[in-house]
Amino acid sequence: MTGRATGGRYSERPARQTDGRAGTLQEVAEAPGGQPVWSEVDRYIEDLLLGPDPALDSATAASAAAGLPAIAVAPNQGKLLQLLVRASGARSILEIGTLGGYSTIWMARALPPAGRLVSLEMDPWHAEIARRNVAVAGLSEVVEVRVGPALAALEAMVAAGEGPFDLVFVDADKEHNADYLDWSLRLTAPGSLVVVDNVVRGGAVLQEASTDSAVIGTRRLFERLSAEPHLSATAVQTVGSKGHDGFVIAVVGGPA
Ligand code: SAH
Ligand code: DHB
Ligand code: MG
């Protein structure tokens, strides 16, 4: 993330060239749309509304240095998650899919004292990096990373009587998203929020005949949401530095 800038200074800077396309800010502003504009607008938003953040920047750098894929939520999306935690007054969070703990840190920071976040991660190396990043952010007492396949972990959590969680963020293997929704309903209470990342995937969600397990899993999620009387859901498409994608946001407890 770059530092906070004034509007005036921002407009003097050249556009960031993330995708091999040259472009001044003037050219980006006049372009009809697409990835260069989306990325530049994300940078504008981050510069003015997010500001510098050493712990999150360090988590991003350490994750990249450890060879983790660059698929964490974007900074402005992380802040959206944080605002959802704050606005809902969530005290307990369940995350499915930790990676290097980037989204984890954004959400955990908004918890009140005695708040708690449990994050499920299959890959032990990802979990190790996440724990280090969480420690650098000063959140080791708040965050617990559990290693193992999420389906088994969720089943164990229900069996142990854990929950209810006030917010669930689903962001692991997309193939199992409908199952993650089912388990989330067993680990939440009326009023809890369920947020699912990556539900549009550049429009691939429309491909009825797709053999891609992520697309099949995402379509299954939407079908389950559509048939589920115990929650009220919407989905919002996003464009930005991570391309064209979207979130599902649902409140447990049926239609308002
Ligand atoms: N929420 C993170 C990104 C998560 S990427 C962020 O925005 O910062 C998806 C993560 O899910 C990866 O680390 C991957 O190892 C993990 N994952 C994939 N399949 C899984 C499974 N079956 N159970 C648990 N974690 C899984
Ligand atoms: C992928 C996973 C994510 O959670 C994400 O935000 C972007 C991409 C992926 O598996 O490709
Ligand atoms: Mg994601």
Image (spheres, helix red, strand yellow):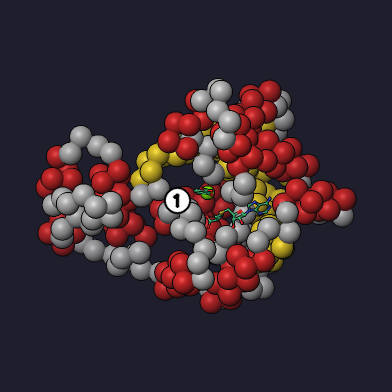
Q: Quadrant of ligand 1?
A: bottom right
Pick the residue in front: 90 or 218: 218
Within 8 Å: ligand 1 and the Cβ of disc 1? yes
- On the picture, is 80 further left or further right than 196? left
- On the picture, is 55 further left or further right than 229? left
In terms of secondary structure, where does tag 1 sit?
A: helix
Q: Position of residue 101 (x, y in %)?
A: 56, 63
Q: Position of residue 251 (x, y in %)?
A: 63, 37
Q: Quadrant of the N terminus?
A: bottom left
Image-quadrant location for residue 60: bottom left
Image-quadrant location for residue 197: top right
Q: Residue at x 72, y 30 (%)?
A: 230
Q: Residue at x 75, y 48 (%)?
A: 151
Q: Is residue 169 visible?
A: no
Q: Position of residue 102 (x, y in %)?
A: 52, 62
Residue at mark 1: 77
Number of dots carrying numbers: 1
Q: Residue at x 33, y 57 (%)?
A: 46
